[in-house]
Amino acid sequence: ACAIKCLNGNMQCKLWPRHENDVKEAKRRGLELDRVLTIEDLVKGDNVFFSATGITDGELLKGVRYDGTEIHTSSVVMRSRSGTLRFVDSIHMPKKLSELSKVSGIEYSTVLKA
């Protein structure tokens, strides 16, 4: 919904509970199951951001690629207020990420060997 709003698009939808627990939770929260929701119901405000990075190749973005020493990613970033749409191609250096990433515990050099 955020991406659609950033592109000045529109959509409508309804809640579609799959299980009785979903129905109970919706009622507990005061949600109307028969109500048609608009883009304004789904995304409040006029300064919305959306971003996505490709994991596998698709129509819009390339998937993550490894070339032995670098990780390449393709992303899109959108902003509703300005209507800006940016495509970002990034090159990540696993060795440097490993040095910077003491919190995550991920050893990025092992990712490239997989």
Image: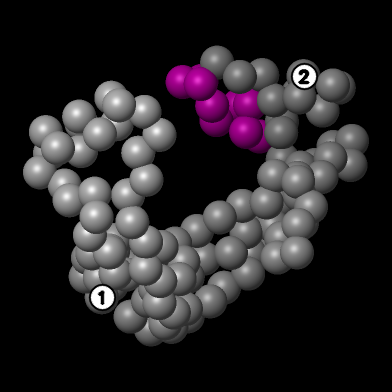
* Residue 65 visible here: yes
Res. 99 image quadrant: top right
Question: Given the image, on which type of amino acid does mark 2 rest?
Answer: Thr
> How many numbered discs, if any?
2
Residue at 30% in and 26% down: 20
The image quadrant where one finds the C terminus is top right
Res. 26 image quadrant: top left
Tell me if 84 is positioned left or right of 5 in this view.
right
Q: Nearer the viewer, mark 2 or mark 1?
A: 1
Residue labelled with disc 1: 46
Q: Is the residue 54 above or below the residue 78 in the image? A: above
Q: Position of residue 30 (x, y in %)?
A: 10, 43
Residue at 62% in and 59% down: 75
Image marks 2 and 1: residues in contact by CB distance under 8 Å: no
Residue at 70% in and 44% down: 55
Question: Given the image, on which type of amino acid does mark 1 rest?
Answer: Asp
Q: Is the residue 102 above or below the residue 8 in the image? A: above
Tell me if 35 is positioned left or right of 72 in this view.
left
The image quadrant where one finds the N terminus is bottom left
Residue at 63% in and 69% down: 87
Residue labelled with disc 2: 110
Res. 43 image quadrant: bottom left
- Highlighted range, magenta: 96-104
Asked whether 102 or 16 is in front, the reply is 16
Q: Which mark is residue 3?
A: none
How packed mark 2 is, by other alpha carbons closer than 10 Å (few <14, some 14-19, many 20 or more), is few
